[in-house]
Amino acid sequence: MMSAPYCCPNCKTNRSRFNIIEQIAHAVRLDPQTGETIERFDAVSDAGPLQAAYNGPARRIQCGSCGLVEDEKTFIKFGENYKRM
């Protein structure tokens, strides 16, 4: 976790109550008709050349007041701007 003040960009008042959502991506192959998992891969490199690696954020933040879920950087930027006000 980054050590920086947060501020919710939606409600603009919450600076202390947040949920940290740790994201863990799993590469899978699904049955196209049923949607059931056919195969689960330990690493994306095992999934073959047609499987793109997940490159999204490792964590997302949810405001504990209004429920907005965004990238951690968004909450940090609003926290930095709040200090200047």
Image (cartoon, rainbow, N blue to C red):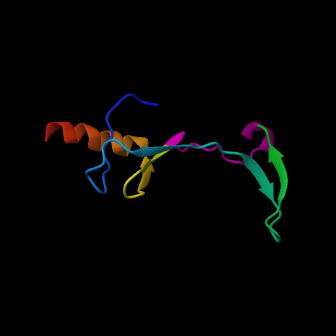
Location of residue 64 in the rendering, given as x and y in whole percent from the top left corner: 41, 51
In which quadrant will I find the C terminus?
top left
65 to 77, vertically: above or below: below
Location of residue 42 in the rendering, given as x and y in whole percent from the top left corner: 78, 38
Location of residue 83 in the rendering, given as x and y in whole percent from the top left corner: 19, 36
Does residue 72 appear left or right of residue 57 in this picture?
Answer: left
Q: 25 or 62, which is in the foreground?
A: 62
Q: Main secondary structure of the magenta part?
A: loop
Count of numbered circles in the view = 0
5 to 37, vertically: above or below: above
Location of residue 2 in the rendering, given as x and y in whole percent from the top left corner: 42, 30
Does residue 52 appear left or right of residue 35 in this picture?
Answer: left
15 to 35, vertically: above or below: above
85 to 34, vertically: above or below: above
Residue that sits furthest to the bottom in the current view: 33
Q: Quadrant of residue 36?
A: bottom right
Residue that sits furthest to the top in the current view: 3
The residue under the point 28% across, 44% down is: 78
Q: Quadrant of residue 38?
A: bottom right
